[in-house]
Image: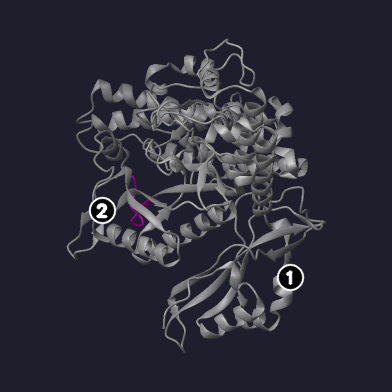
Amino acid sequence: MKLLYKIPPQEHNCDSLKKILKDHSEVKFVSLMGIDLGGNATDEKIPINIFIDDMEDFLEFGIQTDGSSVVLHEIATLNNAKLDIIPDLNVNWFIDYNYDLLDEETNLPVGTLIIPSFLIHENKRVGSRAILERAFNFFKKSVMELLKIHPHLLENVGIDSIEDIQEIELTSATELEFWVKTPEDLANIEKLHTSQALKEQYWQRTSGTVRTALEKTIIKMGRYGFQPEMGHKEVGGVRSKIGVDGRTNHVMEQLEIDWKHTNKALQTADNELFIRRIVEDTFHRYGLEVTFRAKPIEGVAGSGKHTHLGVSAKLKDGSYRNLFAPVKLKEDFLSILGYGALMGILRNYEIINPFINSSIDAFNRLKPGFEAPVCVVTSLGHSPEIPSRNRSVLVCLVRDILKPMATRLEVRSPNPFSNTYLVISSLYQTMLDGMIAAAESGKSNRELEREISKKAGEESFYLDKDRVYRSELNVFEHFTKEERDKLFGVHPATPWENIQNLEKYKERIAILLRGNVMTKDIINSVIVSTIDKWTNELEGRVIFDNVQLIRECKELHGEDTVTDLDNIHWKNINNLRKELMKDSTNNLSIIGRIRKALHQGDYQKASDLHILMNEKVDELRNKYIEYKQNLLEA
């Protein structure tokens, strides 16, 4: 008997569901999966017989839960906590199998039917899935209206008449990077850094349990219909070892998995969330830990989740036209709407970054030197005829002159824990703003290319005067930090700084509110939850980890082998340790001052000190490595 992996939308009616579940008695539970504003998924185990017996009510009314326990700050509050979770009948439902528990009757693993759902508070859809659904529908409707009002846009992409269009389709996809390691193993930063510098791991052959788990994951993804395209090693990691028992040990590797895009944004985000479960469960079964953190190991490459977006028109004759691809692919990089979408992201990135990167971990990744984007800039390529790719920019143009449908935008700043529902929603809203501006400007492809390629100080009908938005150079190597800050804008270093951009650019918030995609309450909830998460992580996790590191940096040299250099190293290290965490009656350490600022609600000071602490901890870590390198015994 074959396992059931998914139930498509056309089967989401009582008659079909009862028959399917009767034929698959190994499915023992149901879980309604709502997504809060933090990207967290609800997971409850409802016995399948309860679902079947009361199926009509379940499908229409769902279940109730306590909304104060999820990330819906100042929406679902302690005194107004009722939250409904209502099934979404228009996306695929998946079966999550527990391979460690077999059904006694069928001898198959016990399954849970995962039903992606909407969160409802006071009769309003408030969760992440609802925001993305509204953004998706509003974008499609608005693009159709643009094409009707501005017929020159049709000619620009090779469509004869608005009457030829059946519908607008949006393609979206994410790439998932992650680290795997054997439990208890600690990172050797020097070895990891050297391996990365030598490019020993990128696209190398996987082996042992890592290979087995990766291949098993890809096979499972295929069974669920996710259409996996590739799995490979990423830049981070070191070679694993084989123990005397023949097992792979000391695993510490970075991997990436890619799968086919979809033309339904909600399905894209739902798929990614479930694929993360497949990855975790599969690698765990082979004794390997998985982390989707953006920067799990300081000093080496972090993990990204590059997000791809495209827009097409499906014609009534069954053919497609990519609305980002120009008619003459060898002469122009993008269509008018393509340039508009790209400019919309770049001009308004400061107001969408809070929905893309909201954690300390995210900003630990976004630093120069690790291929992580910190500059609000794009690259089009060196010439339209020969497409190229600049990996140092925020937004890449992906194109193939032989495949017009491949033209799309790749946003490189999201990380594996970014809330994909909010990432895509905010990108759609800003892309649309730029597309409207480009359409109304009446400018040609070439004129828009000149606009996006402007120099600092040059006027623009849409882009900010003092900024530069395009570079075909490596922005980390060609420009100094001061030059990057001046030309591309100062990148926030903490979640607090990121949130402050919503106030700095408050006149642009209206872009997110268009079509009621987001509301002021939702934006405020994201702000409050981000600050709450940042302050709690800073005090309860980051400071705790740094204190442990400071205490582990101990004097190691002995009297018999000590040199004057050892003494100098240790004196500098010990001074840093005291500066970081040793308080006195007259002077607070950096950590002591952070705690005081947090308790007083002085978040700007706490943020400034957070940055200073990071710099000093990096300095301490590097000095301690240098100190140990001169010791005969350590």
**Residues under numbered marks 2 and 1 in contact, where contact means CB atoms less than 8 Å apart:** no
Q: Which residue is mark 2?
A: 206
Residue 99 percent across, percent down from the top left: 42, 74
Instruction: Classify 143 as above or below 507.
Output: below
Secondary structure of residue under mark 2: loop
Can you tell which quarter of the image residue 234 is in? top left
Up the image or down, 139 lies above or below 343; here it is below
Would residue 180 be counted in the magenta stretch?
yes
Left or right of residue 64, residue 366 in this image: left
Nearer the observer, 563 or 547: 547
The image shows a total of numbered marks equal to: 2
Q: Position of residue 177 (x, y in %)?
A: 41, 47
Check disc 1 and give the amino acid type.
Answer: Glu
397 or 471, which is in the foreground? 397
- Towards the viewer: 376 or 374: 376
The x and y percentages for residue 158 are: 52, 37
Q: For residue 555, what is the image quadrant?
A: top left
Image quarter hosting the C terminus: top left
State whether the magenta stretch is mostly helix, strand or loop. Answer: loop
Q: Earlier in the sequence, mark 2 or mark 1?
A: 1
Mark 1 secondary-structure assignment: helix
Q: Residue 221's image quarter?
A: bottom left
Q: Residue furthest left?
A: 244
Q: Name the residue carrying label 1.
A: 60
Is 93 on the left or on the right of 178, as rendered?
right
Q: In the image, 242: left or right of 449? A: left
Task: Give the amino acid type for the residue marked by disc 2 in the picture.
Answer: Thr
**Quadrant the N terminus occupies:** bottom left
Q: Residue at x 37, y 67 (%)?
A: 285
Q: Which residues are magenta?
A: 179-187
